Image (cartoon, grey):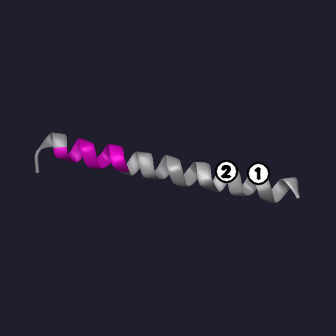
Amino acid sequence: MDISQIMDIGLTFQEKQVKIQSQLDLLLIKYFQV
């Protein structure tokens, strides 16, 4: 594997983390609004 492939994997992993985090935030907001 070269550096560009490693960078791509790192970026997609970060993007997935951000999406999961935002979904968790939305769930928490809905939960606390009730």
Quarter assignment of residue 31: bottom right
Write the residue at 25% across / 42% down: 7
Q: Position of residue 26 (x, y in %)?
A: 69, 51
The Cα atoms of the two marked residues, 1 and 2, are separated by 6 Å
Residue 16 drawn in magenta: no
Q: Is residue 4 left or right of residue 9?
A: left
Task: Check disc 2: other Cα within 10 Å, few if <14, some if 14-19, many if 20+.
Answer: few
Amino acid at pointer 1 = Ile
Q: What element does badge 2 sit on?
A: helix
Toward the viewer: 6 or 30? 30
Q: Is residue 34 left or right of residue 22?
A: right
Q: Which residue is mark 1?
A: 29
Write the residue at 86% across / 53% down: 33
Q: Position of residue 3 (x, y in %)?
A: 15, 41
Write the residue at 70% across / 57% down: 27
Point out which mark residue 17 bears.
Answer: none
Point out which mark residue 25 bears.
Answer: 2
Q: Residue furthest left?
A: 1
Q: Which quadrant would the C terminus be assigned to in this image?
A: bottom right
Task: In the rendered view, tell whether residue 31 sits above or below residue 3.
Answer: below
Amino acid at pointer 2 = Asp
Asked whether the beta carbons under mark 1 and mark 2 sit within 8 Å of each other, the answer is yes
Write the residue at 43% across / 46% down: 15
Q: Main secondary structure of the magenta part?
A: helix
Task: Check disc 1: other Cα within 10 Å, few if <14, some if 14-19, many if 20+.
Answer: few
**Region in magenta:** 5-12
Q: What element does badge 1 sit on?
A: helix
Quarter assignment of residue 23: bottom right
Q: Residue furthest right?
A: 34
